[in-house]
Image: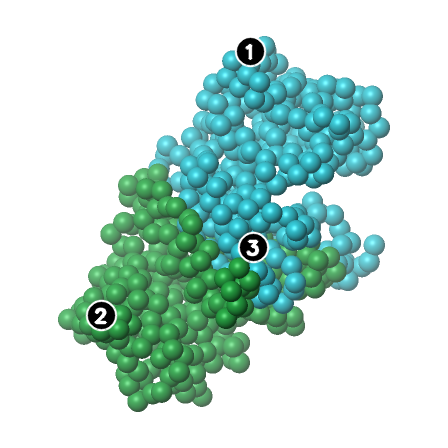
Chain colours: A green, B cyan
Amino acid sequence: MPAEANKRLCDIGEDELIARLIAGLRMDDSVLCGPGDDCAVLTGASPEWLDLLKTDVVVEHVHFASDADPEQVGWKALARPLSDIAAMGGLPTAAVVTIVTPDHLPLSQAVGWYRGMQKVAQTYGFSVVGGESSSSPADHAVISVSMTGRVEPDRCIYRSGAKQGDAILVTGRLGGSLPSGRHLNFQPRLTESRWLGEFFKINAMMDLSDGLAKDLPRMMKLSKMGYHINVENLPCHHGVDAQAAMGDGEDYELLFTVTRELVPELLMAWQQQFADQLDLTVIGEVVAATKSDGQLSGGWDHFDNKKSSSTSS
Amino acid sequence: MPAEANKRLCDIGEDELIARLIAGLRMDDSVLCGPGDDCAVLTGASPEWLDLLKTDVVVEHVHFASDADPEQVGWKALARPLSDIAAMGGLPTAAVVTIVTPDHLPLSQAVGWYRGMQKVAQTYGFSVVGGESSSSPADHAVISVSMTGRVEPDRCIYRSGAKQGDAILVTGRLGGSLPSGRHLNFQPRLTESRWLGEFFKINAMMDLSDGLAKDLPRMMKLSKMGYHINVENLPCHHGVDAQAAMGDGEDYELLFTVTRELVPELLMAWQQQFADQLDLTVIGEVVAATKSDGQLSGGWDHFDNKKSSSTSS
């Protein structure tokens, strides 16, 4: 590891980079939740709603291939932050878009991105209200999207609220998002999240973007809890094994916890509400907080997952 | 000009590109002002405030040089959208930041950007509440910032409100922003804008980012008005001529119009409030709308400005 003054971004992980960047930021009293959750949460102009704010980005060659359908790229660019609004239990209100592109980009491609974004906005009931464009000295494109939303104060669901003994659940199925193309046309779980928040006390929630093996430990760390996952219970997409379901990422499913006693009623109500459309699976439970060495307790039964063991157990 | 299907972004101007991109967007009823003004304006959760939303971006090699002071780059990245919040007459509430950078970027540089952004937030009373980072396949950095704000419904100032006979005024001095380095450490005119909105009926306002010669015609086009500028009256920075004052850009001063009758009182009150700190200059007037050919009437006295004549007169 190079000396502090000579460090480059590649010398530290993403989580440490973010920790370094935000270390000097100061939150004023209006900020109920700053960096670290799916969205920032602020007191709004009305006591009946909290304001949500999220920014996200997709980069050509990193998040989408150059030959991907532009409309699907636009869908993904906007559906990703919408998934974060859903993960707070909120409703979307508006989005703004910045594109940074080489001058030689075909006009039809940029127009296609916007068509895909308008589709998301129309499907989920909000508007893309503005944007910005800049030419880029590079030959790849960047689409940066920011979203606002709102949520009732008693229905805002943070990552940090998991309690010992909670059941851990996940919507849908996991894994294989990139090879199947699902990462370009997934449905953010907005309807499901609003339904969950209306009828059940959800203790903690996030959306799965980097994969269960990375994301679950983040949620549990914020909750100061450990976890125990039954890997054999993981709902895998067809042709995907448990390792891929944990590590592939880009699932954009909801990961959440509820008091164990609620589970039978929740599963029955879910079945009635979303029958055949979307699975809901109990994958594990929240366990006692930290081990003696200060590390989180994390267990992945019948499974030797190096990623998870290096970050959390 | 290539056939429509083969067009690239470089084949059309920035204004036409934006027009093409937003053509398919649909605004729902909550959107009072979509793309085209300094910020988007939406009805908020409280009838006492409108919501403002803005996104902006700075790109290395385009908006800042690689050897620029990182703290000043961060200042600029956040002060630019703040200037847009000010241009609506509003107050900032929060910002989110996305950085897209090559992996070999020195950590100290990214940390410096954030330090500069925190300075803006602290100076102007809001918080940077989150962000996102992505590695870039290119060797230059992109900093994309989005801001939220709010404004009282009767104090929201659009570009479109200029009226025939209005005086056109500009704060501060213009020109030479890039060579002087002012583009990296300018003060957004938030205090001045709030003061203007509190004590005077401002009919139209915007901030000057692309230069008077480009920006004024945009405001007048949205107001469906023409303009007449006394070029000899332009408040130029020391060592800058009128042509540079009109064309250089990156001034981030306020350009606004008020009923002519208000001008003496406004200038006197300004003098008392901001004496010696900041100029306020009447630079021209709003004139009858369009010429017979549908083009805007635009006049730049004693001045042969090709940019303005090609876009507006």
Q: In the image, what residue occupies the spot 50% across and 71% down?
A: A1
The answer to which quarter of the image holds residue B189 is top right
Marks 1 and 2 on same chain: no
Q: How far apart are marks 3 and 2 (CA)?
A: 37 Å
Is there CB contact under 8 Å for labels 1 and 3? no
Describe the element under mark 3 as helix, strand or loop: helix
Q: Horizontal placement of B64 versus B247: left or right?
A: left
Looking at the rendered structure, which numbered label has been put on residue B268?
A: 1
The x and y percentages for residue B11 are 78, 54
Identity of the residue drawn at 36% across and 59% down: A37
Mark 2 lies on a secondary structure that is loop
Q: Decide if residue A288 is on the left or right side of residue B254.
A: left
Q: In which quarter of the image is the N terminus of chain B?
A: bottom right
Residue A2 visible from this viewpoint: yes
Q: What residue type is labelled 1?
A: Met
Circle 1 or circle 2, nearest the eye: 2
As helix, strand or loop, the secondary structure at mark 1 comes to helix
Residue B131 badge:
none
Q: Residue A217 appears at what percent x and percent y?
A: 33, 71
Residue A8: percent from left, percent from top: 55, 64
Which amino acid does the dot numbered 2 rest on? Ala
The vertical placement of A27 against B281, above or below, is below
The residue under the point 43% across, 83% down is A244
Mark 2 belongs to chain: A
Q: Mark 2 points at which residue?
A: A289
What residue is shown with label 3? Answer: B109
Label 1 vs label 3, nearer the camera: 3
Dot 3 surroundings within 10 Å: few (below 14), some, or many (20 or more)?
A: some
